[in-house]
Amino acid sequence: MLHIREAIVVEGRYDKNTLSQVVDTLILETGGFQIFRDPEKMALLDRAARRRGLIVLTDSDGAGFVIRNRIKGAIPAQYLKHAYIPDVYGKERRKRQPGKEGKLGVEGMPPQVLEDVLRRAGATFLDGDGLSVPSGPPLTKGDLFAAGLSGGPDSAGKRRALLKRLELPEHMSANALLAVLNGCYSRAEAEEILKNT
């Protein structure tokens, strides 16, 4: 298992499943074209990029480039690295037919190809000691409840105040806030943030 400092964004859950067998890092999904109408997801990508760097790893078809360009247009270039998979024609095992352009996506790439494209993109590979985010077990919904940020009186108001302090969209759900806290901060940093709510 390879340890990478940067977070990686892929299109969907099958891409994430394949990549998680190769690297140990925060892997985020765009949900395909949902990224265009999900400000919470874009805020999470932006926060992850600013905290630890973000590698964009989308499919090599036209749709993948549209999604890549959306991310590229929303997040400052100094926080982004781009990994490109090669054009390999075929179909993924789970699909009945090949995709529109007949190319394999991230989910169809062998582990060595994924490692190679991440290295070419300039991913920061760590020896295990250099990984600082995340450390410790992730926060849970119970932690948010204990901090008064979900399921209690005025928890929505408290959550909005915290989101404003963290410079995140005010309408983020408790689940989206949890993803930011777990993906962009160490356990100790996240606990400190919750303590100061």
Image (spheres, rainbow, N blue to C red):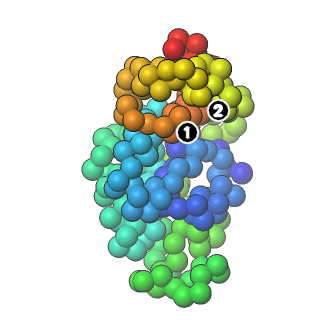
Residue 78's x, y, as percent? 34, 40
In the rendered image, which residue does mark 1 sit on? 175
Residue 180's x, y, as percent? 51, 35
For the point 36% across and 45% down, the residue is 39
Residue 191's x, y, as percent? 61, 19
Local SS, label 1: helix
For the point 44% across and 36% down, the residue is 172
Q: Is residue 119 visible?
A: yes
For the point 68% across and 39% down, the residue is 127
Residue 85's x, y, as percent? 48, 68
For the point 42% across and 83% down, the residue is 100
What distance separates the C-alpha of mark 1 from that of mark 2?
Answer: 8 Å
Q: Residues within 10 Å of mark 1 (few under 14, many from 20)?
A: few
Left or right of 158 in this view: 133: right
Question: Extreme top residue here?
Answer: 196
Q: Give the image quarter of residue 113.
A: bottom right
Residue type of the residue flagged with mark 2: Lys
Q: Give the image quarter of residue 44.
A: top left
Q: Is residue 121 visible?
A: no
Residue type of the residue flagged with mark 1: Asn
Q: Earlier in the sequence, mark 1 or mark 2?
A: 2
| Front residue (pair 25, 120) | 25
| Front residue (pair 195, 185) | 195
Seen in the picture, residue 93 relative to 144 is either above or below; the reply is: below
Question: Extreme front residue here?
Answer: 153
Question: Extreme left residue here?
Answer: 73
Q: Residues within 10 Å of mark 2 (few under 14, many from 20)?
A: some
Numbered mark located on residue 54 in the image: none
Left or right of 67 in this view: 194: right
Seen in the picture, residue 197 relative to 184 is either above or below; the reply is: above
Label 1–label 2 contact, CB within 8 A: yes
In the rendered image, which residue does mark 2 sit on? 141
